[in-house]
Image (spheres, grey):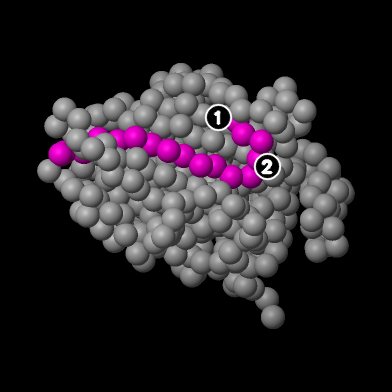
Amino acid sequence: MSKRYKAAIIGGSGYGGAELIRRLLGHPDVELVRVASVDFIGEPLGAAHPNLEGRSDLRFLGITPAEAAQGMDVVLLGLPHKVSAQKVPELMATGTRIVDLSGDFRLRDAAVYERYYGGKHPAPEKLDGTFVYGLPELNRDAIRKARYVASPGCFATTITLGLLPLAKAGWLSGAIETVGITGSSGSGVAPSAGTHHPVRANNLRTYKPLDHQHIPEIVETLGFAGAKGLDLRFVPVSAPLSRGIFATSFAHVDEKIGEAAIKALYAEAYANEPFVRVPAKRLPEVVAVSGSNYAEVGVQVGSVENGRRVVACFSALDNLIKGGAGQAIQSMNLMLGLDERATLEDPGGWP
């Protein structure tokens, strides 16, 4: 029995591509038809992804975007920043739906993109809202109607989910201080000095402090949600993990807003979200969500300082799934009118 929809992946040989392939191979309603890549051309999927050995007869194809999109209902892009934007105009001409996992269409301002991504945007005319920002917890209805979705970054998803209830309530403003700890797979499949195992396995080190490319993405998203005048001071930290992100954000709300109201806000905000949970008797932790599309969010309410109450917001997720490929498939499901949980409900392992 044939499946209802057909999908192709462009850029399928990286870690994000591996998760896209793994999830689509088990999808009840979407058939993975093609996987394009500049690497491993003609080789089976298992050549790049050992966990997929023997799972499919598909091979990596060296084809153009238009060829990859032919006859497809949706194309998912697992390409690097700047490369993705170069392929999108050709894909748009085919009429297919697009879910882009790169940072190329998340921001609305070409000057901000140039500042944080280190070069002029290849298609600045597409930053006018052509792409819907693919965070279902904020933009579910818009994603359902979209033909083009820009899937959020891993740090951006983690930090935004931790602060989103405060933003939606209109309680979030001013300075936010965040420390985000991330696993090495977030740096991609190509090894570098910062991801080399001997210097990562027993080490903690910061990189791009106060200058990470997800800063404007988070500020823009929380602003759309209802935050006012945000100044995000974000310090990312490389940790000896393969997968996972844990973020701690310090916000300040009006002193009249008490602990009970804040905790109730978080519980209510995510009560009906299929992939975000607020643990009742513990705070978020990476091992509880690693290998899954679930995120965990928690909050600790502190004392009042200068008329503002301190709130510590904690969030954790798997950077390759809810922070990457899984969230992209969640958006794809919404775009196609499917159950957004399809092929994403497995809970991961423990510990």
Q: CA distance from mark 2 to mark 1?
A: 13 Å
Left or right position of 249 against 184? left
Left or right position of 196 against 267? right
SS at badge 2: loop
Q: Percent x, y for residue 111?
A: 41, 21
Which quarter of the picture shows residue 289? bottom right
**304, 254: nearer the viewer:** 304
The stretch drawn in magenta includes residue 39: no
Which residue appears at 48% of the width and 70% of the height? 339
Q: Percent x, y for residue 59?
A: 82, 53
List the residue tagged with mark 1. Answer: 237
The stretch drawn in magenta includes residue 243: yes
Left or right position of 62 against 228? right
List the residue tagged with mark 2. Answer: 242
Q: Percent x, y for residue 329?
A: 55, 57
- The reply to whether dot 2 and dot 1 touch (C-beta < 8 Å) is no
**283, 67: nearer the viewer:** 283
Q: Identity of the amino acid at label 2?
A: Ser
Which quarter of the picture shows residue 271? bottom left
Quick one: label 2 or label 1, which is nearer the N terminus? Answer: 1
Q: Percent x, y for residue 95?
A: 53, 52
Q: Which quarter of the rendering shows the C terminus? A: bottom right
Residue 11 in sight from this viewpoint? no
Which quarter of the picture shows residue 326? bottom right
SS at badge 1: strand
**167, 30: nearer the viewer:** 167
Q: Identity of the amino acid at label 1?
A: Val
Which residue appears at 46% of the width and 44% of the height? 158
Q: Which residues are magenta?
A: 238-255
